[in-house]
Amino acid sequence: MSDIRIKKRKRMREKDAKNLSSVLEEAAGAPVFGESDPVDTAESTDYGLIFVGGDIIGLVFEEKPFLTIRGILRYKPAKRYVTVDMGAVPFISNGADVMGPGITDADPEIGEGDMVWIRDVKNGAPLGVGVALRPASELSAKMPGKAVRTIHYIGDKLWKSGE
């Protein structure tokens, strides 16, 4: 039902965990887990998962690691954000892709194909994680059509697995 199927969970070697931490820090613009934190990886039906302790704080989609919504709430990233107006919030909360006209702001360093996190304009609260379908210049230009493909959002099975 709402459970995410997790298989092949294993502890990462310290060196690999340190490399993963630096990749996530580069993407997020904020420090993530430290060397003393136990880091595990696992596979699910949709993407790879990154655990710190018992929490799923990251996912690996198309070989690109990024923070989950719980990871975003924990580490408060400063980069790779796409801000949407409040009218888009109910749609994104149900898993819809982000459309160009709903975007109010975007990190200027975003490139096409980058993993991004989606936040609302009023509170800056994370709504989802997705893949940018356009570079930042086109995201901020509010061009019509899909701008971000949503792969994880508040209320999906990955979010519910942490409740």
Image (spheres, rainbow, N blue to C red):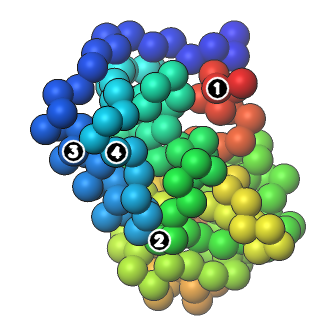
Q: Are marks 1 and 3 in contact (CB under 8 Å)?
A: no
* Amino acid type, callout 3: Lys
* Distance in Å between CA atoms under marks 2 and 1: 24 Å
As helix, strand or loop, the secondary structure at mark 1 comes to loop
| Sequence-wise first label, 2 or 4 | 4
Label 1: few (<14), some (14–19) or many (≥20) C-alpha neighbours in 10 Å? few
Q: Residue 34 carries which label?
A: 4
Q: Which residue is drawn at 36% across and 73% down?
A: 111
* Amino acid type, callout 1: Gly
Does 8 sit above or below residue 16? above
Label 4: few (<14), some (14–19) or many (≥20) C-alpha neighbours in 10 Å? few
Horizontal and vertical percent for residue 8?
A: 31, 11
Q: Residue 18 carries which label?
A: 3
Check the picture and name the quadrant holding the C terminus: top right
| Sequence-wise first label, 1 or 4 | 4
* Distance in Å between CA atoms under marks 3 and 2: 20 Å
Residue 43 horizontal side relative to residue 63, left or right: right
| Sequence-wise first label, 2 or 1 | 2
Q: Which residue lies furthest to the left in this view?
A: 15
Q: Which of marks 1 and 4 is in front?
A: 4
* Distance in Å between CA atoms under marks 1 and 3: 24 Å
| Sequence-wise first label, 3 or 4 | 3
Quadrant in the rendering for residue 70 = top right
